[in-house]
Image: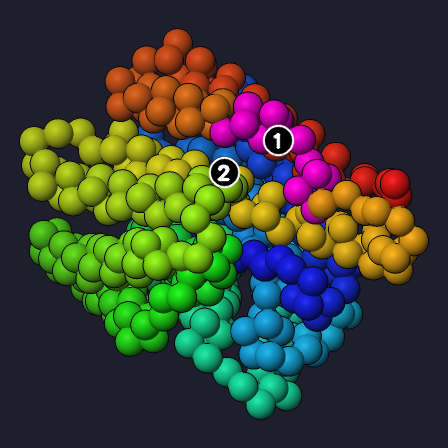
Amino acid sequence: MFVAGGNLVKNTSYKVVIPFYGYAALSFLLSTILIMQNTVAFTQHYFNPYTLAITHTLALGWGTMIILGASHQLFPVLIEGKLHSNLLAHLSFYFAAIGIPLLVFSFYKFNMGIVAQTGAILINLSIICYIANLIMSISKSKKGNVHAIFAITAAFWLILTTGLGLLLIYNFTYNILSQDSLYYLSFHAHMGIIGWFLVMVLGVGFRLIPMFLISKYENKKILWFVYALINGGLLSFIPIIFMSLEFGLYLIPIVLIGMGIILFGYYIKQSYSKRIRKKVDGQVRISMVSVAFMVVPVLILVGIITVFTSMNNVKFVLLYGFTIFFGWITAIILGMTFKTLPFIIWNKVYHNIAGLGKTPNPKELFSTPIFIATTAAYIIGFVVFGYGIVSTDLLILKVGAVFLLATALLYNLNVFKILFHKAQLK
């Protein structure tokens, strides 16, 4: 979902991209603060005001905002053209930046009135601006590829997700849907998780991880197979949930999506084995670990289905959601942020003065010791908090939450160190 390098940075103004990064970092911090304050919510049913607020802070403020920002920069590279409109990109940011806190606040207070409705409308306007920008950009481009198809498909899944979310908000007050909002929650969540996050991350991961590895491996047939498996799996989920078919049939979309993830892992493994750059830095290693994390939610889902009749599955549903947002999504963002943001800021600060003296390397714009500490805190927090969910032990959950909060604080420290970097010529 990210891109770096001299020519790539020039396609879209840094003024478009930077606000998304800063907003996402602060949203990540806010989500860990909310977790710290409401740890007990992770011992209860997943449909409660606090987990809803935390989930949407992570899904919209953290994951979606950083993907929106980075893809405004990446998409022109995929289509070998220019972003159609910086204005639409700015509007996309401002609509979402206002709408997200309104929606999160409403979930936290569990008031689905005018504030929640306004927030949901603004978020949908943001996504409409984003999709319009992509469509206009690709219409002016003479070249498209499978990576661009992944991105535009993910964007359409996103607007379906936020559109259904808007209907669910209004359904609390006006009963406009045939069932209550909880009935549609699973489909709403999986359109966002699989259709938006997974399709986008896979499509862009196919492009960026081999690029950062400087790998010679390429196999477009695998990309198309993955595209078909992931989207086919999500589409097969629709009749199962809305026709209330046998619960075991959920294995069909799970198997299809699981096969897609395994093929993606195979592609990355081949890229790694045929890389030219033998030394792989820490940022890329974390992102590659996130590929392994993709399998964890699939295994948890299989576990839920196979033991559903004999065990209480609520804590496993919580664990499933936790591994998605704090597993592969957070892992890939933590890794790729520091492969991309330094190049964006370096280009902003040094582009016009690079010949006047010796400039620092982009990787010198952030602190490696802080990055290492962030990684350590993240791994400990992820493992401990995940175990706390399964054991429903409040003390373990609280310890895990402390490490997750430390992760967010350290991440923000490094991100804003980069964002406020001033020219340092030698």
Q: Residue at x 76, y 51 (%)?
A: 346
Q: Residue 239 appears at what percent x and percent y? A: 21, 67
- In depth, the one of 147 and 43 nearer the eye is 147
Start-end of magenta stretch: 362-375
Asked if 418 appears above or below 129 in the picture, the reply is above
Q: Relative to the observer, which residue lies in front, 331 or 187?
A: 331
Q: Is residue 271 visible?
A: yes
What residue is at 61 percent from the left and 25 percent from the top? 369
Residue 88 within the segment the image draws in magenta:
no
The majority secondary structure of the magenta stretch comes to: helix
Q: Residue at x 75, y 50 (%)?
A: 345
Asked whether residue 184 is in view, the answer is no
Q: Which residue is mark 1?
A: 368
Residue beneath disc 2: 282
* Marks 1 and 2, how far apart at CA: 9 Å
Check disc 2 and give the amino acid type: Gly
Left or right, residue 276 beside residue 27: left
Relative to 244, does residue 224 appear above or below in the rendering?
below
Does dot 1 land on a helix, a strand or a loop? helix
Q: Amino acid at mark 1?
A: Thr
Position of 56 with respect to 125 (left or right) is left
On screen, residue 156 above or below 14: below
> In which quadrant is the C terminus drawn?
top right
Q: Secondary structure at mark 2?
A: helix
Please name the residue shown 88% across and 57% down the image: 355
